Image (cartoon, helix red, strand yellow):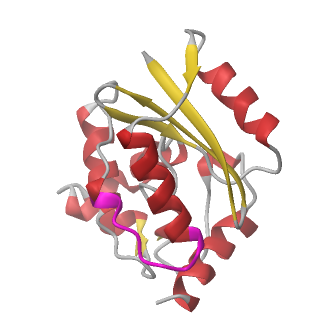
Amino acid sequence: MIKYSIFKTNMGWVGVLVNQRGVLRTTLPMGTRLKVKEYFTSFNNSLLYSGLNDEITLVKREINLYFNGCNPKFNLINMDLSELTNFSRNVLNISRKIPYGETRSYKWIAKSLGNPRSYRAVGQVLAKNPLPILIPCHRVIATSGLLQGFMGGKIDLDLKRKLIDFEKNHI
């Protein structure tokens, strides 16, 4: 069974999908609750059940801490990345370890994987990150320091800049 919850944060409405193994998907802040629900409906055609469980309660607490300028403990959250390739899981697990308020480059992640030339593939994985905020793909930038790509181009780079600046102002 897949459960979901949609909740308001200081930056907008955020949603979380969980199954028995952990968190499947989160959203970046959206303008309305309805937009989050429509997104979840398009992602998963099976029945979704609104409700709370321990994992959803934990995710909501930690995401609200994040958007209130505190350093959350996302490492306490079980994440279900089982449907992804090994490469994708490795990229996301390395990205997950980027410290709050810091950035790393796509190339840095590629080097961490032992293949410095795979930075474009790293970017493609991060563009499809199913757990934004929990896995901080917004902390990954170009080697030059410029912001490039965010959520596959679906989201304006202004949000990426806003999240990076937000963290730097709350260290």
Image mark count: 0
Vertical placement of residue 120 versus 22, above or below:
below
Identified at 36% across, 65% down, the residue is 107
Place residue 51 in its image quadrant.
Answer: top right
Nearer to us in this view, 44 or 33: 33
Vertical placement of residue 125 versus 115, above or below:
above
Identified at 57% across, 17% down, the residue is 48
Q: Is residue 29 left or right of residue 92?
A: right
Residue 79 visible from this viewpoint = yes
Find residue 25 and report its horizontal and vertical position in percent: 49, 37
Find residue 168 and report its horizontal and vertical position in percent: 53, 87
Q: Is residue 71 left or right of residue 16?
A: left
Identified at 21% across, 55% down, the residue is 113
* Magenta residues (range): 67-75
Magenta part, dominant SS? loop
Q: Is residue 80 magenta?
A: no
Vertical placement of residue 158 versus 1, above or below:
below
Find residue 103 and report its horizontal and vertical position in percent: 44, 77
Place residue 11 in its image quadrant.
Answer: bottom right
Find residue 159 and report its horizontal and vertical position in percent: 70, 65
Place residue 44 in its image quadrant.
Answer: top right
Nearer to us in this view, 108 or 15: 15
Q: In which quadrant will I find the N terminus?
A: top left
